[in-house]
Amino acid sequence: MRRLIALLVIALVGATLFGLSTTSSGISVNGTTVSNATLRGELAAISSSTTLQCYIEALAPANYGAGAGASVATTGATAWANLRVEGLALEQYARVTLKFRPTQTVLTQAKASLLSELTQAVAGNTTPCPGSSAQAFAAMPPEMQTFEVASQAASLDLVNKLNGTIPLTVANVKKYYDAHTANYDTLCVSVALVSPSQVAAFNQAQVAGATVAELAKQFSADPSGAKGGAFGCYAPSTSAFTGVRADTLSTPLNTFPTTPQYVDYNNATYALFVAPTKRTVTPLAQAQNAVVSDIETANATTANTEKEKILYYSAISVDPAYGRWGLNTTGPSLFAPALPATANVGASQTVAALSSASSSTYK
């Protein structure tokens, strides 16, 4: 669900957007409009709350830095408007086509799901966000809260009704786990951090029969090399599990892959080899969160395909200051407005006059 939810949650840092009129509609989707006054209120809330800002940025990364004239950067403004358009389109589809009418119980569950998504989004942050997801939600204006919960509820309903998605029930989680048990083994790994100039020798030594421990002791620049590369064990409940699983799922036990990853270490580039040394079956009770996350990811892929179809058939109008609505390689999307190169900008007197006129017109 995370990718789908990212389409529904508003993301932007800043307070002023290209000097747009507060009386005009910033975006319109199938006749439903969001005024610039509403959007500015949401932007002000995000920019004034470090907690809300941190959670939003983690959920939907983009460049939301300041642009020319202290306005929001073009790319950030476009990304934010795009997310708002997609959220409106999905909510309308659920309401009109799927006849979705959420009860208060469903909305309460949707809010809990949204808070969980926000919490998961910041789990991988190097620096933790200040405050909780509940505090981030509380920092949203009331209208923004209502929209976010309604959109979350609609997205969950869409996922449950689509062909090819897996409703998140206890029975379905168990069934999925039983069919993919090996994907949730607790993994113990050893690593070797090898200088690029020694990669060929490292691979040749492994072909000649050197063990994982011997290879790590001989070639690894990581401190773990002294103890044969043993780096630790990772259960599905650990934050690093997904990455470790991806690195080792297709690698036989006690074997380094022949193709490494390249990483920065002590201001130099090294080849990183990761070998699984032990796989232990993890009970469902301990693997449940990872299983649910995998189901959500699969569902989000299916839902995003459906989202593209929904956007194709939606009547969408966007203030040109936000960008241009069109098609990219993944479907309908909002493109950042093309700005002229600095060399093509007119004389400073002309630019100053235009800036002055724009400022007085749109304040």
Image (spheres, rainbow, N blue to C red):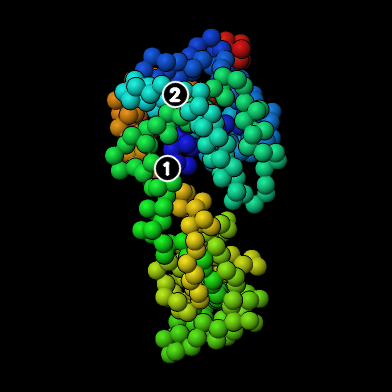
The residue that mark 2 highlights is: 102
**Is residue 312 something one can see in this rendering?**
yes
Q: Position of residue 212 (x, y in %)?
A: 51, 82
Most distant residue in the front direction: 171
Number of disc labels? 2
Q: Position of residue 139 (x, y in %)?
A: 66, 27
Secondary-structure class at tag 2: loop
**Nearer the observer, 188 or 333:** 188
Q: Is residue 234 above or below residue 154?
A: below
Quadrant (top left, top right, bottom left, bottom right) of the N terminus: top left
Q: Is residue 66 above or below residue 241?
A: above
Q: Position of residue 86 (x, y in %)?
A: 42, 29
Q: Residue at x 41, y 21 (%)?
A: 101
Relative placement, left or right, of 96 versus 274 is left
Query: At label 2, which amino acid type do we have?
Result: Pro
The residue that mark 1 highlights is: 168
Secondary-structure class at tag 1: loop
**N-term-proximal mark, 2 vs 1:** 2
| Image quadrant in which you'd find residue 230 | bottom right
Disc 2 vs disc 1: Cβ atoms closer than 8 Å?
Answer: no
Q: Residue at x 57, y 68 (%)?
A: 233
Work out how far the residue at label 2 is from the one at label 1, CA to CA, in angstroms. Answer: 17 Å
| Image quadrant in which you'd find residue 320 | top left
Quadrant (top left, top right, bottom left, bottom right) of the C terminus: top right
Q: Position of residue 299 (x, y in %)?
A: 38, 43
**Nearer the observer, 281 or 349:** 281
Q: Residue at x 67, y 33 (%)?
A: 135
Q: Is residue 34 above or below residue 83?
A: above
Q: Residue at x 42, y 42 (%)?
A: 168
Label 1 packing within 10 angstroms: few (<14), some (14-19), many (20+): some
The mark found on residue 106 in the picture is none
Relative placement, left or right, of 291 versus 314 is right
